[in-house]
């Protein structure tokens, strides 16, 4: 791999955002994902290569470490922030259509539920996995999901719920999507959600963690 790609990859894996960032201590004073990505683009590197050869593999390593409980939420958030600092340089190329993404993913925390830390991690990992993410936020009612589906044909839907009480709203949203739309893939997750519950409410896939969600989406487009 090109030296600069491998450096960007390390920055994302270890959460080095930019030169000013003191974290991680052993990379203090060095360029971060922000400066290195800018430099790579200025040197003529393709945005798609930076995404596919540096950012996506680094986020996959981060996701696997998190699944194996080798790192925890703070390290994952730093990795995601580092990835975002690189993505801000790549986004104009994706928005102009010059570089392609794998597909669209609509995510939200279901109606009545204000928890968004886990949902945000999933959204960031999926963006780092090469997808365009449309984040509808928290307390998202069925109508808002349906409107987003209309506006983004072909998108995969992700529903998050953290309360046993709002799991019922997850079920209502899945039921409404099934009644009104066909061929929509629905991924569900959140602390109280299980594989059995996913099957019971007619969603397509349950993932306990962000990397499982990324793997599921990748499997859809492969
Ligand atoms: Co609340 N809360 N909370 N809370 N809160 C819990 C969930 C609770 C378990 C605490 C407890 O009682 N022990 C409990 C739920 C009990 C239950 O339903 N069985 C609870 C309660 C009761 C409440 C209130 C009702 C409290 C009250 O007001 N009486 C209230 C409800 C408000 C509402 O939503 N309407 C409430 C409020 C809040 C805060 C606002 C204070 C705050 C949320 C802040 C925020 O999110 N911006 C909060 C917090 C922080 C928590 C705890 C402490 C932490 C949740 C969290 O962020 N975890 C939580 C207790 C706990 O879990 N220890 C608790 C870290 C996060 C990374 O994990 O969200 O599970 P998680 O996400 C994981 C996976 O689940 C998965 O990936 C993530 C990364 O691994 N995942 C997906 C998540 N979504 C996914 C989607 C996918 C795939 C995977 O595909 C689409």
Image: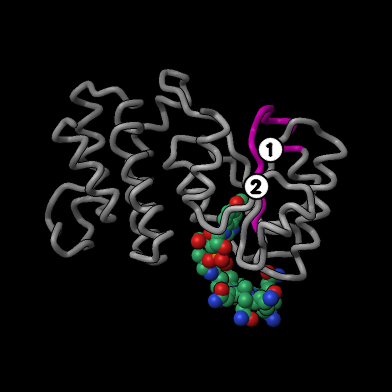
Q: Give the range drawn in magenta.
A: 147-160
Instruction: State the image coordinates of residue 31 (x, y, percent, origin top left).
Output: 16, 47
Ligand 1 within 8 Å of the CB at mark 2: no
Q: Mark 2 points at which residue?
A: 205
Please indicate, yes or no, whether residue 171 appears anywhere in the rendered image: yes
Q: Please tell me how many numbered marks the rendered image carries.
A: 2
User: Is residue 136 visible from the viewing direction of this image?
Assistant: no
Crowd rating for badge 1 (residues with CA inside 10 Å; few <14, some 14–19, many 20+): some
Res 38 → quadrant? top left
Q: Quadrant of ligand 1?
A: bottom right
Disc 1 to disc 2, how far (Cα)?
A: 8 Å
Q: Using residue 215 as the reference point, say whether residue 53 is left or right of it.
A: left
Q: In the depicted view, which residue is nearer to us: 67 or 182?
A: 67
The answer to which of marks 1 and 2 sits earlier in the sequence is 1
Instruction: State which mark lies toward you, 1 or 2.
Output: 2
As drawn, the residue found furthest toward the top would be 98
Secondary structure beneath label 1: loop
Q: Do callouts 1 and 2 mark residues in contact (Cβ within 8 Å)?
A: yes
| Residue topped by disc 1 | 185
Residue appearing at x 31%, y 45% in the figure? 58
Residue 157 highlighted magenta (yes or no): yes
Name the residue: 76% across, 37% down: 147
The x and y percentages for residue 5 are: 21, 35
Q: In which quarter of the image is residue 183?
A: top right
């Amino acid at each position: 791999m090109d030296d600069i790609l491998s450096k960007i990859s390390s920055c994302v894996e270890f959460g080095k955002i930019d030169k000013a960032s003191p974290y991680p201590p052993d990379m203090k004073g060095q360029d971060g994902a922000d400066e290195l990505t800018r430099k790579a683009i200025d040197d003529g590197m393709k945005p798609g290569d930076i995404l596919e050869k540096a950012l996506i593999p680094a986020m996959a390593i981060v996701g696997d470490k998190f699944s194996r409980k080798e790192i925890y939420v703070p390290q994952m958030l730093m990795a995601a922030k580092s990835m975002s600092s690189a993505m801000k340089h790549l986004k104009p190329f994706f928005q102009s259509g010059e570089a392609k993404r794998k597909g669209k993913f609509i995510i939200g925390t279901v109606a009545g539920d204000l928890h968004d830390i886990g949902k945000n991690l999933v959204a960031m990992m999926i963006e780092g996995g090469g997808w365009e993410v449309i984040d509808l936020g928290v307390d998202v009612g069925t109508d808002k999901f349906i409107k987003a589906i209309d506006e983004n044909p072909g998108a995969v839907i992700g529903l998050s719920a953290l309360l046993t009480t709002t799991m019922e709203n997850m079920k209502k949203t899945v039921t409404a999507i099934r009644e009104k739309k066909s061929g929509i893939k629905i991924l569900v997750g959140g602390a109280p959600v299980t594989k059995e519950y996913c099957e019971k409410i007619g969603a397509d896939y349950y993932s306990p963690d962000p990397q499982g969600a990324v793997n599921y989406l990748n499997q859809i487009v492969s």
